[in-house]
Amino acid sequence: QSLIWGSVPLGMMATAAVSATLLPAAGPKWTLLVVAVCPLCILVASVLRWLPEERLPPEQRRVDFSVFDKHKHVVTLAACMSAMAIMLAVLQILIESVFVRCLVIFICGAMLATSTYFSLRCITPLLAKTALFLFMINAVQPDLSEGAMQTWLTHAEGGPHFSKRVMAARQGVSAFGLLVGAIFYNKFLTACRYQRIFLLAQLAMVASSLLDLILVSRWNLSIGVPDVAFIMGDDVIANLVGRSFMMPLFVLSAKVCPDNLEATLFAVLMALFNLGTTVSTNFGAALTDLLGIRQGNFDMLPHAVVVRSLCRLLPIPLIFLLVPDLSPQDPIPGGEGSVYECSQYDKAW
């Protein structure tokens, strides 16, 4: 985990350097083209067969549909997740009422959380709790970064009016924060309890969120801190704390997956985590609409930042309810090495 998540920021920093150089000279279209073509390098490893893989015989290259019936709980959950993702996408397009959108988001989130727990508890209760935590940790925190905050940073009257070069440079600074976070976790947190790591990291994320309040209220200028310096420092802190939270979370997710279903269940857990992020984005969009925050009107943006910061306190009870009192170095009871076996009650359910 440390090697992988420590390598990702290096690529991000290289991408940010290329983007920051190309954007002013070539414009966004050519920059996007260059950045989009670069991932084709991955094909080199496949074509030259650098990966230690062997092709299956032709008679084994078929879909075994009996697996769907054997693991119908997981299949049902995957179908529910797909349906919810489509529903949330349609929701943003067709429904204009903020109240209705908030209600639908809440109902969808509650239904998915319930189905997640009851679908996975027949495998292991700890897997079900971890899956629920992965979804809820994001779903209850509205995300403002991709909408209101992004627009305010670049176009708002009285805002910083950051250039494309500055916004590209932010990606490199954020990647540096991720790299420092990966090193910090590997050096100091691997022997700490999950609950302690998540609690301290969540409290740090609340504090980091409140830094945005200083920026949008323009208090940083009152104390003589330029916008660029403030936002860069904020990005480093936020990504350092975020990576310190995510790495043990991914370690826990990998460890709770039992034998015979490791790849499938880990993919389901990561999909739940990403779906929670989607709910968070929809939650943030509904919040900005509710407060009347639109391009040209950012008067209520400080209030939205305060609401987001308070919502980041909501996952704290979940840490003690759903996360095991273990460390990343401890074995998981009923995790690795356990066998997938449903009880009669769960089969009937």
Image (cartoon, rainbow, N blue to C red):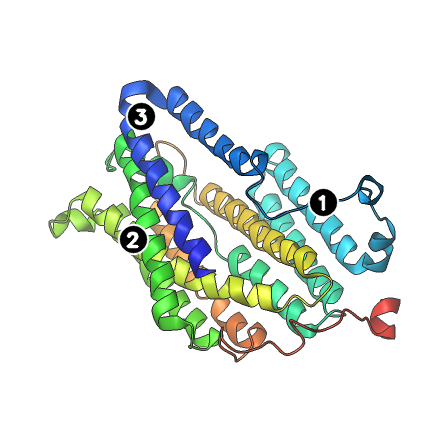
Q: Is residue 162 visible?
A: no
In which quadrant of the rendered view does residue 334 lie? bottom right
Is residue 237 among what the camera can see?
Answer: yes
Secondary structure state at the residue bearing disc 2: helix
Please tell me which residue is depicted at 83% across the width and 54% down the height of the picture.
67
Picture quadrant where residue 160 is located? top left
The residue under the point 40% across, 50% down is: 7
Q: Position of residue 71 (x, y in %)?
A: 81, 59
Residue 83, numbered label: 1
Q: Residue furthest left?
A: 224
Distance from disc 2 to disc 3, alpha carbons, whole Å, reads 22 Å
Q: Position of residue 145 (x, y in %)?
A: 40, 45
Between 309 and 14, the residue placed more toward the observer is 14
Mark 3 lies on a secondary structure that is helix
Q: Amino acid at mark 3?
A: Leu
Dot placed on the residue nearer the N-terminal end, 1 or 3: 3
Crowdedness near tag 3: few (<14), some (14–19) or many (≥20) residues, C-alpha within 10 Å: some
**Quick one: label 2 or label 1, which is nearer the N terminus?**
1
| Mark in the foreground, 2 or 1 | 2
The residue at which mark 3 appears reads as 23
User: On the rendered structure, is 167 left or right of 58?
Assistant: left
Real-space Cα separation, disc 2 to disc 1, in angstroms: 36 Å
Q: Is residue 304 above or below residue 349?
A: above
Return the residue at label 2: 236
Point out residue 126 in the picture as x, y percentages from the top left corner. Answer: 64, 73
Q: As displayed, is residue 344 above or below residue 292?
A: below
**Label 2, residues with CA under 10 Å away: few <14, some 14-19, many ≥20:** many
Q: Hey, what amino acid is under mark 2?
A: Val
